[in-house]
Amino acid sequence: MRDLLNKIKTDAEQHLGAIVSEEELEKFRVELLGKKGALTQVLRGMGALSAEERPKIGQLANEIRASIENKIAQKKEALAKAALERKLESEKIDVTAPGVPVSVGKRHPIDQIEETLCDIFRSMGFEIAEGPEVEYDTYNFQKLNIPENHPARDTQDTFYISDAILLRSQTSPVQVRVMEKQRPPIRIISPGRVYRSDAVDATHSPVFHQLEGLVVDKGITMSDLKGMLAAFAKQMFGENTKIRFRPHHFPFTEPSAEVDVSCFVCGGKGCRVCKNEGWIEILGSGMVHPNVLRGCDIDPNIYSGFAFGMGIERIVMIKYAIDDMRLLYENDLRFLEQF
């Protein structure tokens, strides 16, 4: 048995020299030292040895096993080091080679226009206010003087989560939340994402963006609203831009008006952008309804205010002569890189 053990050691050392991969090394270890390995099988025959030979052969077997395990560990370390060197060699970077061009991103046109709008109104003294997109019916409708039988409250227009909770259909609830917490004077804008159950087409989307504004103070009149919007239109669309008010109805303002701007492309003469009308509708506005002020514990006999709201996508489409809103959401870089 002594000779057999020595032969196993010699063969193992020779075999180790020919191994070139860690997979081969592991297979060799199992075949030699595993439960069914060659050395293990020899050791199982020690029971047939005499009492005198058994301790001597056992000591020799342990020495051979330790020697083989040590050589396997050394071989494994050498193979790992060689593999790392090959990997480093293959991944070598030539710092003198020309660089790969990296595309630089830019802000989406909706974000660009929203930022421009915010800058314009900030320059007029407005502060930006934000509110939750998942809103209570109380803030989205009731506190805005919208009765339960109003069409806007129909489930065909609004995404209801429960009877009392919905996805806000406008950023107007932010105005209410500000008036509840802050006493006049108030001058805020509230840009943000809103939701309505509209079918997707060239001018509608179930998800879009609004920017609304609110001013509440003593002595605020319709002329303040007209002067502010005229200044806004000139900054947004050009110095020669004019505005036009048309009577309208909104539950939360009284009186109310739709606001048009003179076409900045044709100067009011009529073109494709303004549909040959010379005017482009951009927003809704009006004086804050007394019921809305009372609901926020603001006395309408002392304070008055005006509010306005616009769709940001609409401003983008007007500004860049885009005729299909869906282009803004398709993420086609060929389109977006133009802005």
Image (cartoon, grey):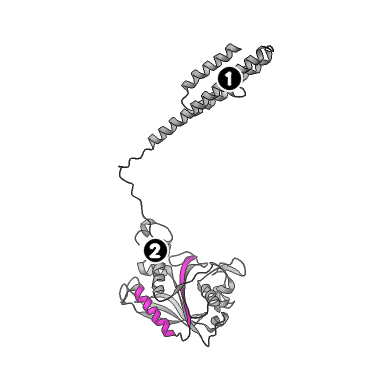
Toward the bottom, the furthest residue is: 301
- Under circle 2, the secondary element is helix
Number of numbered tags placed on the structure image:
2
Residue 94 in percent (x, y) is at 33, 40
- Under circle 1, the secondary element is helix
Query: Does 17 appear above or below 218?
Result: above
| Residue depicted at x 35% and y 40% | 93
Residue 132 in percent (x, y) is at 54, 67
User: The residue under label 1 is which amino acid type?
Assistant: Glu
The circle on residue 109 is: 2
Examine the structure image and report whether residue 231 is included in the region drawn in magenta: yes
| Residue depicted at x 41% and y 35% | 87
The circle on residue 78 is: none
Magenta segment boundaries in residue numbering: 207-235
> Which sits earlier in the primary sequence, circle 1 or circle 2?
1
Which residue is denoted by mark 1 in the rendering? Answer: 63
